[in-house]
Image (cartoon, helix red, strand yellow):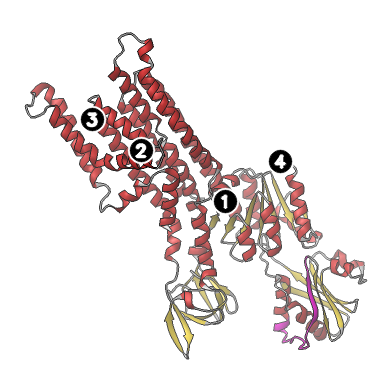
Amino acid sequence: MANVIEHTHSEEHDHDHSQESSSEKNPYLSPIISLALLLLGIGLDFFDKTQNFTFWNEITRIILYGIAFLLVGWNVLKMAFQSLIKGQVFTEFLLMSIATLGAFYIGEYPEGVAVMLFYAIGELFQEAAVNRAKLNIKALLDVRPNIASVFRENSWQIIKPETVQIGEKILVKVGEKVPLDGIILSENSSFNTSALTGESKPKSIKKGEHVLAGMINLEKIIEVEVTKLFTESSIARILELVQNATSKKAPTELFIRKFAKIYTPIVVFLAIGLVFLPYFFVQNYMFNEWLYRALIFLVISCPCALVISIPLGYFGGIGAASRNGILFKGSNYLDLMSKVTAVVMDKTGTLTKGVFKVQEIKTTIDEKVFLKYLKTIESHSTHPVAKAIVSFADEKKIEVISTKIEDLEEISGHGMKGKIKEKNILVGNLKLMKKFGVNYDVEIENIVETIVVMSIDNQLVGYVLIADQLKDDAQSAIKKMREIGIKETILLSGDKSSITQKVALMLGISKAFGDLLPENKVEKVLELKRDTSRIIAFVGDGINDAPVLALADVGIAMGGLGSDVAIETADVVIQTDQPSKIATAINISKKTKQIVWQNIGLAFAVKAIVLILGAGGLATMWEAVFADVGVALLAILNAVRIQKMVF
């Protein structure tokens, strides 16, 4: 992955030499020797005024300063030449080469060496900062399991996880990483999930529940049935998301790249004008004096600070977010997240645990028969409510009806229908009953909790009362959003309007809409988007949320328990399934943008002041070095701050 990131960085910002320096055995050796020679030369220059050293003449000065210059400047000169051959005339390498060689031409050897030396030091700082920013992301590579112990031919065999098939049984010992996603067959164990979620607290997982690749088994030897191939596992998906994140640029990054392409040639032509135009207007014109001013102008105007620090700021933001269990699929989404004014949320699985329990059964027929029909139909659904009913029937030792179900169909936002033993069965909500003209007591509509109603041959035979639980941090999540300036929080749910309103009231959500089909959710978001001042983030976890996730300005998926479709469609993935991370994601994006704009302001302000002083002959090459390399270093140090912040 490091290669991917380095390639992108170098390709887009013309910093290919960073790869060269990193390949050397010790990238710091050349700058150290160059600095020692520069200080020696400056010392000899100073003492030569009083001591008149016979060996210290123009030739020995050129040799000493020339060696010091080439130690740090050779790569830059080479890159400038290669860029010219490719037709890329106006690069930072050319600016640096002209400025430093020009300084040698007019006899300002120490200043020429200093410019190139501090430029090289700036590059080393930049490389170190980028590497530090990568650490959080590269750490994900280390959690990829290398081996899997799989049961084949009546024995446990150690093989590569890539070769394990779905349905095979694997063994995970204490302290080992789970190599593939699967269902735990052993009773239970606790797992370190920090690589996937950023959470340090161990998670206890029971028999029949899902474990994910990259989790570390902490308690006992377990057996797992594989449910996904290695390439489709959670950890592989996370790595792919983060690797691709660096290729999607924020508008600020794109602007700076375009700006640098226009800005650099303008600066070169202004420098040429600064050398020759004064000849026509100034008495006692001295070519070397105006050339020196132009060289200062070139050094100051190099856009390094902007080109380096802005992508680094966003990169640091993506790294900080991944450390907190939040994956941004690009810095463009990180940028947009900072502007969000309204957060629209799904209810089930987003604010509630999505772990349903059967509370009560009301039926006009035998309860066992009622549950048999109900389980037979609901066993074909992946909805959390359906799973709760099947689980409840399993506990009661209720078997499914062995007869084949005819005309089985899932009606989105309504429920399911099918034919068993020539009987038409409808299982779902009251909207399904209305759709097929099934009569029911209007009192049922007053029940606040979730209900699943069943009819046989258009006759209502009973219903099941289901309850869901709010997530532990749901209330604090809404509070945090308000504290960081989110103006509107809106709840959209396919659940009953009475339940939706009750949840909204409990959590302090400003608006809530229930009884919505997936297409109704889309309509609601389109309605909200008519107000162009709104920047909308939608948070969801299910397959039915995918259209809205794609439609919102920023789509956020709850990734731990969310569907693959939702995760693929979303722009941001919250690995921990904690709604409080929504506010964390917004906070990180705001801090990132703040740092990026601080760097832009700093670079432009300092450069503008020193440019004016340089053109007026009031600034030397040393001030120019600070305006270029010094500002770049300050901007880098500012950009890496976000990696140390606690969110």
Label 4: few (<14), some or many (≥20) within 10 Å?
few
Tell whether position 147 is magenta. no
Instruction: Please tell me whether mark 1 sits on a helix, a strand or a loop.
Output: helix
Kindly identify which residue carries mark 2. Answer: 93
- Magenta region, residue range: 393-412
Structural distance between the alpha carbons of marks 4 and 3 = 57 Å
Q: Nearer the viewer, mark 1 or mark 3?
A: 3
Amino acid type at mark 4: Thr
Structural distance between the alpha carbons of marks 3 and 2 = 19 Å
Measured as percent of width and height from the top left, residue 207 is found at 58, 79
Q: Nearer the viewer, mark 1 or mark 2?
A: 2
Instruction: Please tell me whether mark 4 sits on a helix, a strand or a loop.
Output: loop
Structural distance between the alpha carbons of marks 2 and 4 = 43 Å
Kindly identify which residue carries mark 3. Answer: 110
Residue at 85% of width from left, 66% of height from top? 431
Label of residue 532 in the image: 4
Kindly identify which residue carries mark 1. Answer: 585
